[in-house]
Image: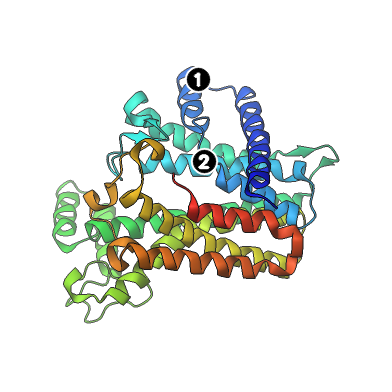
Amino acid sequence: MTNSAFKVHLQEMRTVIEAALVETLDRSEWPNALKSAVEYSLMAGGKRLRPVLVLLANEVCGGRQEDAIPAACAIEMVHTYSLIHDDLPSMDDDDFRRGRLTSHKVFGEALAILAGDCLLTLAFETIATQITGAGEINGLQIAEQLRILASAAGGSGMVGGQVLDLEAERGAFVNLENAEMHIQHAEKHGCESGAAAVQKAVDSADFPNVHGETSTSIPDFRQNNSNRTTASRVVLLSQIHRMKTGALIAGALELGAATSSADADSRNRLQHFGHCIGLAFQIADDLLDVTGDQTKLGKKSGRDADLGKLTYPGLLGIESSRAKAEQLVQEACDAVADFGDRSRWLRELARFMVERDH
């Protein structure tokens, strides 16, 4: 198989996805401002990596593409919502995304937040109301797809990873100083439940020298960076990437398998493939932020350094990071080797993800 053949197949799938997204938006009955904001971000192009992975996993497992299209659209909606919110001033504070101004720069923060909310809910509606040529999809199949998407996008997946990323960048959200201030403010205004809620958050947090020990179940980002070894930082960074980026990518593979009613072994192999390429994809992103061309990237380069983010190049250097990404791609390809020639497109996509220039 030639690289050009892969690119043709990739473009064919993107065309199918774009048409399905347009059709979904055309059916919407929303206020005009909301529809404009949603369309601005959802139809801004991009690699469409996650929906393509849904279609490829469905294909590998012998499914029908039409059965996977609703899930493919849904995961792209969730991804786009996450980008809108990530770009907000309270998060990563970016001005450009996919070569154009970010949503809040065009529509204002309030409408950008609501556009993201709309896309998140539309994703679940799209799966829940799917119809194919064969009639209505089995209710249990729909429920399983909804579960997979919710798990990948929620607190144990993408959203939780974003929290850990922000903690690593800025320190803990809950700290003793601001907690004391909020408790006093709540008590002053007679809000006993509010004061109790803040106190509960403080009590559940593992502040060093307060409770005597620190929890080992959640990475502690509050300790001084100088006290951490490179190895421990890499462990923390891998956890962030596995949740923030990898969960949705692995979820795309699992969704595709679910749309074809694949067996447990096939789903496990595809999930493992997804976690490997998810981390490889993020390492490639970190590298592009250092070495990439801003015009091709469609956003300002060097943002990770500006924000003080943990990155693989920052911890291991450029060459070691590239080697790690290549190792992960090979592990991913090995995970789907038993699918034989049916996995050829997945293997090509894995390599594309680390060789891309944007």
**Residue located 40% across and 67% down the image:** 238
Residue type at mark 1: give it: Pro
Q: Earlier in the sequence, mark 2 or mark 1?
A: 1
Q: Position of residue 52 (x, y in %)?
A: 62, 46
- Label 1: state its secondary structure: loop
**Residue located 56% across and 57% down the image:** 351
Residue 212 higher or lower than 58, as above or below? below
Q: Is residue 319 left or right of residue 31?
A: left
Residue 156 in sight from this viewpoint: no
Q: Which residue is mark 2?
A: 120
Q: Can you name the residue that lies furthest to the right here?
A: 134
**Residue located 48% across and 22% down the image:** 36
Q: Residues within 10 Å of mark 2 (few under 14, many from 20)?
A: many
Q: How many marks?
A: 2
Q: Position of residue 350 (x, y in %)?
A: 57, 57
Q: Position of residue 201 (x, y in %)?
A: 29, 62
Question: Alpha-carbon distance for marks 2 and 1?
Answer: 17 Å
Q: Residues within 10 Å of mark 1 (few under 14, many from 20)?
A: few
Residue 337 in sight from this viewpoint: yes
Q: Is residue 127 left or right of residue 238?
A: right
Residue type at mark 2: give it: Leu
**Residue located 43% across and 55% down the image:** 284
Q: Which residue is mark 1?
A: 31
Q: Residue 284 or 120: which is nearer the viewer?
A: 284
Q: Is residue 145 left or right of residue 77?
A: right
Query: Which of the 4 image quadrants contains residue 260?
Result: bottom right
Q: Position of residue 306 (x, y in %)?
A: 22, 49
> Residue 208 shows which numbered tag?
none
Residue 254 higher or lower than 18, as above or below? below
- Label 2: state its secondary structure: helix
Query: Which of the 4 image quadrants contains residue 225?
Result: bottom left
